[in-house]
């Protein structure tokens, strides 16, 4: 399962990387998203992968309904560039983010972190699994990348890292939130086949992510309901300095 996810990630990088090299099919990149994006009563909704088309749709809806500042989301991730663009919209306009079922990968990295306030339904899951600073998932499968494409991938990764660094600087959140799960001293991903990692409310606050709550729980138990295929990172300042 992890192998297939990695290959899909590399495939996505090849598509975006080809764009940077001027080799992409623009019509394919402009294809309409299958992600559900809508205005429902007093809030916006995104259900499905985050891509540029979904982000453009949400932006257009907001421009026509700028008094609404709540987004309900259920997403397992998607295009990191599109997710950052969506995150900027939420951050600039102080959105409340309501996680309906799950917010994983790029959704957690760039959308969850950017909101002014975050609310989880009783069983919602928010989890990270790496970002631009954690490139080993690409490097260890680099032999699957065609030699003629490897340079394009490297260019994309470099641009991705620079853009992600600027992004976290602007929203004032610790960029390593995407990667502490792989840290040699405080990480938890090395010990099993986990789908991702998460933090408690106190550690999120330390990293710049505040105002987080879950339906029916106290602040300290916000993330106590996670299943065993997600591991918890506990930030220890002493261990981080080693």
Image: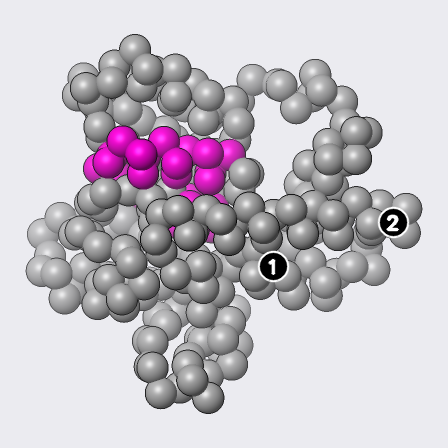
**x%, y% of residue 69?**
22, 28
- Compared to residue 211, the image places residue 34 above or below, namely above
Lateral position of residue 194 relative to residue 216, left or right: right
Image side of residue 38 versus residue 152, left or right: left
Q: Quadrant of the N terminus?
A: bottom right
187 left or right, relative to 172: right
Vertical placement of residue 35 versus 220, above or below: above
Toward the right, the furthest residue is: 148
Residue 166 placement (x, y as % from top left): 49, 48
- Find numbered disc 2 in the image and state the secondary structure of the residue it sits on: loop
Q: Is residue 71 left or right of residue 151?
A: left
Query: What is the x, y in percent for residue 182?
Result: 51, 71
Mark in front: 1 vs 2: 2
Which residue is under mark 2?
146
Q: Which residue is mark 1?
A: 2
Front residue (pair 238, 166): 166
Do the CB atoms of the residues marked 1 and 2 lie less than 8 Å apart? Answer: no
Q: Residue at x 52, y 31 (%)?
A: 51
């Amino acid at each position: 399962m992890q192998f297939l996810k990695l290959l899909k990630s590399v495939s996505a990088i090849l598509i975006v990387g080809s764009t940077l090299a001027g080799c992409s099919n623009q019509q394919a990149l402009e294809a309409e998203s299958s992600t559900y994006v809508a205005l429902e009563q007093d809030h916006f909704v995104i259900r499905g992968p985050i891509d540029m088309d979904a982000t453009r749709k949400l932006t257009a809806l907001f421009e026509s309904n700028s008094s609404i500042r709540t987004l309900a989301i259920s997403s397992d991730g998607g295009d990191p560039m599109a997710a950052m663009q969506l995150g900027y919209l939420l951050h600039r306009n102080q959105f409340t983010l309501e996680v309906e079922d799950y917010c994983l990968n790029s959704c957690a990295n760039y959308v969850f972190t950017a909101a002014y306030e975050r609310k989880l339904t009783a069983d919602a899951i928010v989890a990270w699994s790496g970002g631009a600073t954690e490139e080993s998932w690409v490097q260890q499968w680099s032999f699957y990348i065609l030699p003629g494409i490897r340079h394009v991938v490297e260019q994309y990764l470099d641009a991705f890292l620079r853009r992600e660094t600027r992004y976290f600087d602007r929203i004032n959140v610790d960029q390593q939130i995407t990667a502490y799960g792989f840290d040699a001293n405080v990480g938890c991903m090395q010990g099993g086949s986990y789908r991702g990692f998460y933090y408690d409310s106190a550690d999120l606050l330390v990293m710049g992510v505040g105002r987080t709550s879950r339906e029916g729980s106290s602040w300290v138990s916000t993330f106590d309901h996670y299943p065993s295929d997600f591991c918890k990172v506990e930030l220890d300042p002493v261990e981080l300095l080693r």
